[in-house]
Amino acid sequence: MSKVIVIAGPTATGKTELSLFLAKQLNGEIINADSTQVYKGIDIATAKVEDTQGIKHYLLSFKDINEDYTVCDYQKDARKIIDDLLKQNKTPILVGGTGLYIKAVLYDYNFDNEIKDYSNLSDEELYIRVTKLDVNNKIHPNNRRRLERALSYMESTNKPFSAKEPSEKLLYNTLFIGLEAPREVLYDYINKRVDKMVKAGLLDESKKIYDSGIRSKAVMTPIGYKELFPYFDGKVSLEEALNLIKQNSRHYAKRQFTWFKNQMNFKWFETNYDDFNKTEKDVLEYIKKEN
């Protein structure tokens, strides 16, 4: 099979389970496409796969949480893996909910190679400059590398960074598989999954990170840790912190679904939580038909 398979969609729709099933059926290997799962030690909150079932996984748990790993880094690493797998007649399966990672890898999405030296500016000063030049700026104030790239681009082109359009040229023969669920069903499943994370040790994992004092992008980006930090500080109750995790997870799922619907041409399948085997069967039949 010479196609790349993408499995994406909102959080808690069964992407990991489906990817393992398809990898076994299609001589596939899995490439993580979740920006938080590249880091070691943040496992429960990021819903990282617990049992790989003997399937080779790439770009998973290979960076320390105090390291910076950008979408540009991911693009280079993932493309090399895809090319190597295709040469071996294996099926690369990209799995995750970070849409920008997926798009950067599969499309002719170019990053600027030359970034000016802004070492004289603090993160706050960088953020202020970028925001003045681009009122639609949505870059996190602590994401220094992206702020530097945005400021360099705008000073060179006199165009807002937020309006920079990536190419829509697809570089690989790709099938886009999206998993979705009715909103209320998905939201209920998200709430229950947070409760399961707590039983699996989310509090211990979060407390260990809290005690480390590390507040890097890897720590502050995932939903699950930053919401618990005020609880450890004694500022909110555990119930309040967990409710915030659930609320932020639901909002994130909504944003993910909207993004994927608008950005790429997915074939959408409804997750059958009562009989996921049916979902797997439907997806596999579709893939075989497209080949």
Image: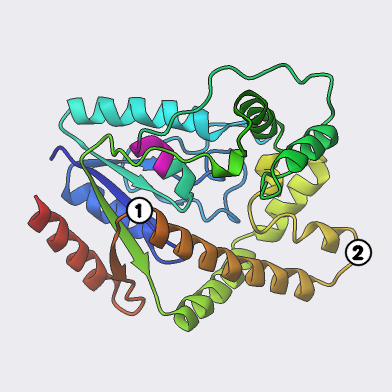
What amino acid is at disc 2? Gly
Q: In front of the other: label 1 or label 2?
A: 1
Name the residue located 29 percent from the left edge and 57 percent from the top edge: 177
Label for residue 264? 1
Q: Indicate whether 121 appears above or below 100.
A: above
Q: Residue 115 location, x and y as percent?
A: 63, 19
Region in magenta: 103-107
Which residue is outermost to the bottom? 184
Q: Which residue is mark 2?
A: 234
Q: How is the image coloured?
A: rainbow
> Viewed as shown, does residue 5 lie left or right of 104?
left
- Is 206 magenta? The answer is no
Q: Indicate whether 268 appears above or below 83.
A: below
Which of the two discs, 1 and 2, labels the residue nearer the N terminus? 2
Q: Secondary structure at mark 1?
A: loop
The front one of 281 and 10 is 10
Whether residue 57 is visible, yes or no, is no
